[in-house]
Amino acid sequence: MIDYFRIESLLTEAERLYRDRIRKFVDEECMPLIADHFDKGTFPMDLIRRMAEMGLFGLHVDGYGCQRMSHIIYGLICQELGRCDSGLRAMVSVQNSLVMYPIFTFGSEEQKKRWLPKMARGEAIGCFGLSEPDFGSNPSGMATRSEKHQEGYLLKCKGGDEDRPDGT
Amino acid sequence: MKIARMARDILGARGILADHQVIRHHCDLEAISTLEGTESIHTLIIGEDLTGISAFD
């Protein structure tokens, strides 16, 4: 494979091995499925369990069933998944950076215990609602609120949503 | 985008078939200029910050 960014020589042996393990997973398990999913407009949900088995969820988290990895490894994982499909990469980056990291950093102990192990196992999938008509991609100005509703939560949006990679 | 377009063109009419991968990446790349706020709207927001003149009123 072409070293597009000329970073091969900058990586450690461990980083290269990790990257190659992901590359093999992508070539063998993702590439054969992806064109069909693209045509149908579906997501290969079975791959979520495989991603969890490979330890791809919880890369910024210590404990709670997660194995923290360096930012370089995280980047290499995203690069390899993105080589196959940006949607696969978004699944991993939203779960890790937009959902698990905020829960680990800002959540209560109860929230961490409740969600992080489940998310690491790929049994819960995180979402992040971002765009609103008046605030674009500015999360600090968001007007959407969640209200407890029967057994779940009801998201009260001020307007429509346009742009959510893991659509809420 | 330029590379994706060229790769699609090299494949001729087959460039738009999912079998050859490039069209999927082409579509994903196209989305990048829209998600997280479109490129042009960001330019107008930065323009307002720099000049104090709003393009939105």
Image (cartoon, coloured by chain):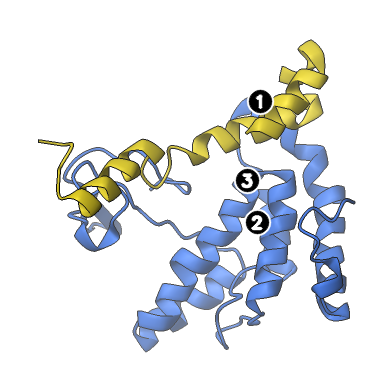
Chain colours: A blue, B yellow
Which mark is in front, 1 or 2?
Answer: 1
Q: Are marks 2 and 3 on the same chain?
A: yes
The residue marked by circle 1 belongs to what chain? Answer: A
Q: Position of residue A149 (x, y in %)?
A: 22, 56
> Which quadrant of the figure contains the N terminus of chain B?
top right
Q: CA distance from mark 2 to mark 3?
A: 15 Å
Tell me the residue at 73%/68% (across/down). A53
Residue A103 visible? The answer is yes
Q: Are marks 3 and 1 on the same chain?
A: yes
The residue marked by circle 3 belongs to what chain? Answer: A
Three-letter amino acid code of the residue under disc 3: Ser
Q: Which mark is residue A39?
A: 1
Disc 3 element: helix
Of residues B33 and A140, the one nearer the viewer is B33
Which mark is in front, 3 or 1?
Answer: 3
Tell me the residue at 43%/37% (across/down). B34
> N-terminal of the two: label 1 or label 2?
1
Three-letter amino acid code of the residue under disc 1: Asp
Tell me the residue at 66%/80% (across/down). A70
Three-letter amino acid code of the residue under disc 2: Ile
The residue marked by circle 2 belongs to what chain? Answer: A
Mark 2 surroundings: few (<14), some (14-19) or many (≥20) residues within 10 A: many
> N-terminal of the two: label 3 or label 1?
1
Which mark is in front, 2 or 3?
Answer: 3
